[in-house]
Amino acid sequence: MNNKDIKAVLKLLACILIITYIADKLIYWQIDNICDKVYTGQSVGKLNHFLSVKDTMDVVVFGSSRANHHIDTKEIAEKSFNMGLDGKQIAYSATLIKTLPKNKKQIVIFHVDPIELFDPEYKGADIIHLNSKYHKIKEIAQEIDKTEQYNFLQKIYWTIDYNHKAIGIVRNYLKPQYDYKLYDGYDPISLNEKQKKIRDITLAAIDDLDCFDEYNSNKLSANYIEDVHEFCRTNNKKLVVITSPKHQYPCPSTSKRLTKFMEDRGIKHYNYINLFDKETNNDYWKDKTHLTSIGVEKFMQEFVNNMKNTLNDN
Amino acid sequence: MLFNSTDYLLFLPIVFIIYWALNKSYKNQNILLLLASYVFYGWWDWRFLSLIIFSSFVDYFIGLKIDANTENRIRKRWLIVSLCSNLGLLAVFKYFNFFTESFAEAMSMLGWQVNALTLDIILPVGISFYTFQTLSYTIDIYRKNLKPTTHIISFFTYVSFFPQLVAGPIERASNLLPQIESVRTFKWHWFKAGIFQIFIGLLRKIAIADNLGLYVDSIYAYPEIHNTSTIILATVFYAFQIYFDFSGYSDIAIGSAKLMGFKFNRNFDLPYFSNSITVFWRKWHISLSSWLRDYLYISLGGNRKGIKITYRNLMLTMLLGGLWHGSSWNFVIWGAIHGLALSGEKFIFARKKNKYFGAIGYVYTFLVVLFAWIFFRAENIKDALMACRQIVSLDFGMPFMGNISIMVHGVLMLFVGLCFDSYLFKKKIPLEEIGEQFNTTKLAISISVIILILCAFYSTSENFIYFQF
């Protein structure tokens, strides 16, 4: 390799770096401008919506799709928002909880499943769904950096913040999917006849579920829950952890260990995972982990009754 | 180490810089490549390096022994030692559980209850590839098509050269060893071609294949609940997922080797632009199909012993080719479908003047390949049959879309990939040569566009599909 070759290679690499760096920032700036105006859609719109209303809400719900589809916030308080989202776990929710206003009195309902606490493989990968705020909200960037789930190239190429999101953002910008002012974050599920048939097959199937009996709590998950507990304790928030029903959940010991974990830390935990074990009505279910609106109605009666004292205290 | 990881993004430039800094001695370069290759492999699991080293030792010495003996009987004996040790490793690590379980199942069907003796064995990454590579070395020496190398470092480098170590292409010693044992000079046009092919490979793998895989996985997890349209759509997506995944891997491998001054053979040649299964196998995983042809099909007698034996040889070759992919009856059935199609074509072509089907052949070929992919993709025979049952139920309702974002990204990226491949097909330009035709500015812009597409659309996947084989 002679000097001429070295120069040619360096020139090519320099050109690529300069072109990509400039183009990346231009594209990022364009998408970011559009993104700020988007309040619908599950990936970015709902997050923007939450960030815009979080300071005024009395009750905020966090968690996975089970939180999203199971907790009808309006049954709890008028000023409430359900920030449950498909595929999100503890890291994502805990990070958002920490963005809540410091002095406003609020109830934080945090949906946690046993698997989220005891899965030894969990490394907080769901936090990367907050990437769109990586270069915009310092607290979120710090949390993402802490879990080491970020792509180091993201520091150079900012468009990675919008990886897999750009098309959805543009679509929701051009044609919002719903009126976000009427949306409280709760998404009820109802099934058509075909979906009911699929549901019946799914419920009848036997799953080989890992109960994680041999594992202690995942350190990262435990830390996040303790962080959230501390944040709520010192910032005028009441933390309620909830576990909603599952269809014939086969791991009672794991469920008990979750409750014990919360009790040991003085965290209020409502565990309804086996609430419908004696019910044979398939209409409550979409699948083994998600309730339909019919199931939610029944579940919410139980939950709201139990929550009454907490609400009155607030 | 995975080609699509940030580890490799750092590893490759470091090796590249040191490699060309050592260009006064190709022997020093070979030592560097050997060490780098062992680091590359050990990144996954250093314990299995011992298998590669063992395999390399055995075949290095056997190669010399075969060459040193003139008596055919002794040469054959050494070849058998090589076959037994290499295939023995494969049998233990890849097929032991499969055969014991299949034996127990067969016995229980006959009414005898036998407990299958299964071992908790991890499949070493790349074992099928480097085993075939070392086997071709000793067989070529036995056939007197190749002289063995006397440089142990060269041979070890040949076996473990990192771009092709874990998922091919299965490079023959006759192509790679002479390159390893001669001075390499940096060629600017090769560098341009190599770096362009690496980025095309990344685009194919992490922007196209991985996006399609998200939908395919969600459907094939529960084939029993989906209608005909959904299963067909998922299978079409899988056909392109596996193509872009594996051809993307091969592109990165070939491109990386080119940066070091090595020329690998093509592994894919737009295989879905084939008008017969015979042509398809000349364009799909070329290094494996030509290996099977030269060392299995021809060894069995090829087409020299009459038409019936030819059919038998084709079937056997494809069945074993299927089994090479994994220890599952799914792969055997996949091989059988291709074997039957190849035999059928042999039968038809023997009675036709033209040895091709014309335009309809493209449709026929794609449909046969698609049908075979169902068995290749399904988790087990039961799921594969369930998928087939759902297809023949002719329930052509709206296909299940799942997450719309995943679907849109998958379709968009597939469109990009198909446009690029159609361009290559129409212009008859090999991908391997495109990069070298660009000037610096054009190349920089092309790669920059790919980088920006990757930033916006990449999808993360645990592995390349062919790593499991």
Image (spheres, coloured by chain):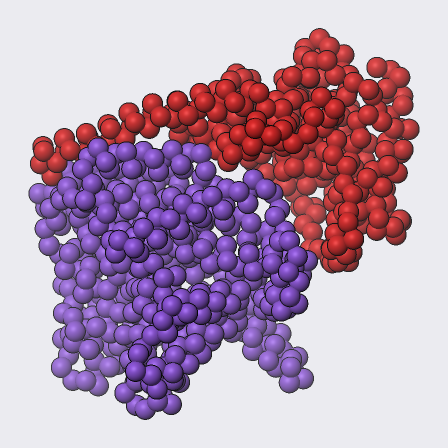
Chain colours: A red, B purple
Depth check, front residue: B466 or A164: A164
Quick one: quadrant of the N terminus of chain A? top left
Which residue occupies the foreground of this view, B452 or B351?
Answer: B351
- Tell which of B215 and B119 is nearer to you: B215
User: Where does the image place residue A52, in percent across and percent down from the top left?
Assistant: 65, 17
Q: Is residue A279 left or right of residue B87?
A: right
Residue B213 in percent (x, y) is at: 51, 50
Q: Is residue A70 above or below residue B105?
A: above
Q: Residue at x 15, y 64 (%)?
A: B149
Residue drawn at x 38%, y 83% as measured from the top left: B348
Q: Looking at the image, can residue A126 be seen?
A: yes
Residue A226 showing in the rendered view: no
Left or right, residue B419 beside residue B107: left
The residue shown at (16%, 70%) is B146
Task: Give the left or right position of residue B192, taking residue B348 as reference.
Answer: left
Q: Quadrant of the C terminus of chain A?
A: top right
- Residue placed farthest to the front in the image? B359
Q: Quadrant of residue B166?
A: bottom left
- Residue A115 occupies which quadrant of the picture? top right
Q: Position of residue B340 (x, y in %)?
A: 44, 78
Q: Position of residue B176 (x, y in %)?
A: 20, 59
Instruction: Please indicate whether residue B40 sits to the left or right of residue B378 in the image.
Output: left
Query: B409 above or below B115?
Result: above
Residue drawn where x is 89% and y is 23% of the image: A308
Q: Which of the pair A46/B105 is nearer the observer?
A: A46
Residue A126, image quadrant: top right
| Count of all numbered marks drawn on residues in the image | 0
